[in-house]
C-alpha cells in the first residue's frame, strides 16, 4: 500500500484542488453521491492499493466533485475487515484522501441500536468510539506522517459535532449523540453480546469506522461520524437482523442524512 502511487493515479485522472472534506459513504448511504455536482469517479479497481468492494449497498468508487458548492471527495464503499482485509488496508483510503488535501473526514455507517430508545432511521452523531475489534490499523512500523502513540482523547471533533447539530436543528432533522462500538463482524451480535455492549457504554454497534477514525486522527484529520440506526440490536426486538433490512432503512433515512452532510459541508 503506497499512498504516493494511489495519489498519482488519481491526480492523473481528476483535477483535485483543495477539497474541504472527504466523505465515506456507509451501507445504503451511497445516494449522497447523486448530490455531488460535476461528479467524476474512479472505480476502486483502478486505484493502486485499493481493492474492489463486494458488499451489496457499496459502489466501490472514489468520486470527486462539489457538494453544497464546496469541493469534496467521496469514498463510495469500504474495505471491511470482515471481507478479509487487514485493518491497515481497510483504512488506507483515509491516507489517500488526506494526501489529496482533505483536512476533514466525514464517516457514515449503518449500525444496530443498542440504546433502547433508538428507533430505525434515527441518526446519531458519534461522540466517541469503542474499538472492539481488538486490532489496530497502526500496529507495525510507524507510517509516514504518523506518530508512534497518537492521542485519541478527541476522536470526533467537537466543533464539527456542534456544527452538525446546528445544521440538523435548522433542517429539523433529529440527531442524537452516542458512542459507536466497532466489532469485526460479519456475524451480527448475539443478545448476550448486546447486553455486554450496553453495559460498557455502547449506543450503536457496527462493523466499520473505528479503523478509519484511528488512522485519521493519527495523521491529523478532523473527524465527523454519523450513524444511521437501522435496527434494534440483537435481542432488543423479536426479529432476526437481515442486511436487506439495513439497506431498506438507510434508503428511508437517506434524505435526512444527505441534507445533513450537504449542510455541514457547505459550512466548512
Ligand atoms: N450490528 C452490527 N452491525 C450492524 C447492525 C447490527 O445490528 N445493523 C447494521 N449494521
Image: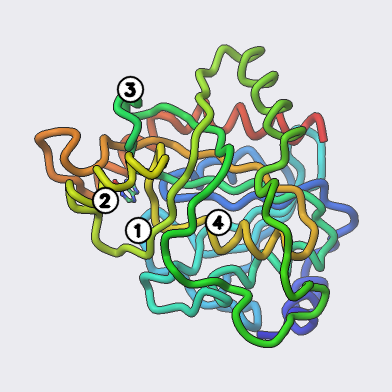
> Pointers 1 and 2 in contact (CB under 8 A)?
yes
Image position, residue 227 (x, y; %): 48, 39
Answer with mark 4 or mark 1, whichever residue precedes in sequence.
1
Image position, residue 88 (x, y; %): 58, 76
- What residue is shown with label 3? 117
Instruction: Identify the residue at image location x=65%, y=23%.
Output: 165
- What residue is shown with label 2? 243
Instruction: Identify the residue at image location x=66%, y=12%.
Output: 170
Is disc 3 surrounded by few (<14), some (14 to 19) or many (20+) residues within 10 Å?
few
Image position, residue 264 (x, y; %): 72, 31
Q: CA distance from mark 1 to mark 3?
A: 28 Å
Q: Is residue 112 above or below residue 186?
A: above
Is disc 2 surrounded by few (<14), some (14 to 19) or many (20+) residues within 10 Å?
some
Q: Is residue 93 above or below residue 237?
A: below
Answer with mark 4 or mark 3, whichever residue precedes in sequence.
4
Answer with mark 3 or mark 2, whichever residue precedes in sequence.
3
SS under mark 2: helix
Mark drawn on residue 76: 4
SS under mark 4: strand
Amino acid at each position: 500500500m503506497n499512498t504516493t502511487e494511489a495519489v498519482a493515479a488519481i491526480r492523473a485522472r481528476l483535477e483535485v484542488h483543495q477539497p474541504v472534506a472527504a466523505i465515506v459513504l456507509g451501507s445504503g448511504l451511497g445516494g449522497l453521491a447523486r448530490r455531488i455536482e460535476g461528479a467524476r469517479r474512479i472505480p476502486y479497481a483502478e486505484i493502486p492499493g485499493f481493492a474492489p468492494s463486494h458488499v451489496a449497498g457499496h459502489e466501490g468508487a472514489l468520486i470527486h466533485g462539489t457538494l453544497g458548492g464546496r469541493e469534496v471527495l467521496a469514498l463510495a464503499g469500504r474495505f471491511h475487515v470482515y471481507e478479509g482485509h487487514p485493518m491497515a488496508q481497510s483504512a488506507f483510503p483515509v491516507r489517500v484522501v488526506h494526501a489529496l488535501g482533505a483536512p476533514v473526514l466525514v464517516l457514515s455507517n449503518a449500525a444496530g441500536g443498542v440504546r433502547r430508545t433508538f428507533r430505525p432511521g434515527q441518526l446519531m452523531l458519534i461522540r466517541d468510539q469503542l474499538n472492539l475489534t481488538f486490532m489496530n490499523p497502526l500496529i507495525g512500523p510507524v507510517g509516514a506522517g504518523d506518530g508512534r502513540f497518537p492521542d485519541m482523547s478527541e476522536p470526533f471533533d467537537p466543533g464539527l459535532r456542534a456544527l452538525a447539530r446546528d445544521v440538523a436543528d435548522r433542517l429539523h432533522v433529529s440527531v442524537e449523540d452516542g458512542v459507536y462500538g466497532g466489532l469485526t463482524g460479519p456475524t451480527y451480535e448475539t443478545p448476550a453480546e448486546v447486553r455486554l455492549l450496553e453495559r460498557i457504554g455502547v449506543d450503536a454497534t457496527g462493523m466499520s469506522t473505528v479503523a478509519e477514525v484511528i488512522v485519521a486522527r493519527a495523521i491529523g484529520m478532523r473527524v465527523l461520524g454519523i450513524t444511521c440506526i437501522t435496527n434494534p440490536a440483537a435481542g432488543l426486538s423479536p426479529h432476526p437482523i437481515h442486511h436487506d433490512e439495513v439497506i431498506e432503512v438507510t434508503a428511508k433515512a437517506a434524505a435526512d442524512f444527505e441534507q445533513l452532510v450537504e449542510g455541514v459541508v457547505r459550512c466548512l
